[in-house]
Amino acid sequence: MCVDKKSTYRLTIDQLRKIYEEKRCIYCKTDLTKVSMSTWQIDHNHETGKVYGMCCINCNRTAAYYEHNPEAYMKIIIIRMWKDGIQKTQEEKWIPEIL
């Protein structure tokens, strides 16, 4: 366990150990023990420093990319849902407004 990660994220050794013990991506639930440890990421808020947990490199990059443009990510999800034939419900009246 890297000591510089402890200081970078302002975590105690116990907090850092707990994050590493999860061994699953907090987003996609990928078993991180089946991928190279160099691709494990500690996902955190770059402005506040708040740590969310351990994630795979793909989810970390996706989260970082869309963090400042959540509307684009919503559009991707909605368009894929429509292309996959998932029907719009009454609660989803807002969808056309962002497309």
Image (cartoon, rainbow, N blue to C red):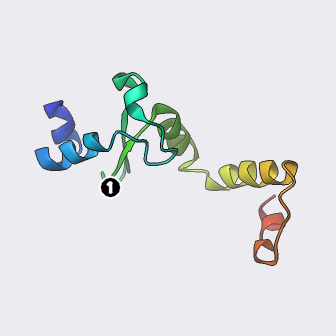
Indicate the secondary structure of the residue bearing disc 1: loop
**Residue 21 location, quadrant:** top left
Of residues 39 and 63, the one nearer the viewer is 39
Quadrant of the frame with the C terminus: bottom right
The answer to whether one can see residue 56 in this image is: yes
> Mark 1 packing: few (<14 Cα in 10 Å), some, or many (20+)?
few
Residue 41 is situated, as x and y percent measured from the top left of the image, at 37, 35
Determine whether 10 is above or below 39 in the image. below
**Residue 23 location, quadrant:** top left
Residue 49 is situated, as x and y percent measured from the top left of the image, at 30, 51
Of residues 93 and 22, the one nearer the viewer is 22
Residue 70 is situated, as x and y percent measured from the top left of the image, at 61, 54
- Which residue has dot 1 on it? 48
**Which residue ends up furthest to the bottom in the rendered image?**
90
At x 77%, y 55%, the residue is 78
At x 83%, y 58%, the residue is 86
At x 34%, y 25%, the residue is 37
Determine whether 17 is above or below 2 in the image. below
Residue 80 is situated, as x and y percent measured from the top left of the image, at 79, 48
Side of 9 where 98 appears, left or right: right
**Amino acid tagged 1:** Thr
The answer to whether one can see residue 12 in this image is: no
Quadrant of the frame with the N terminus: top left
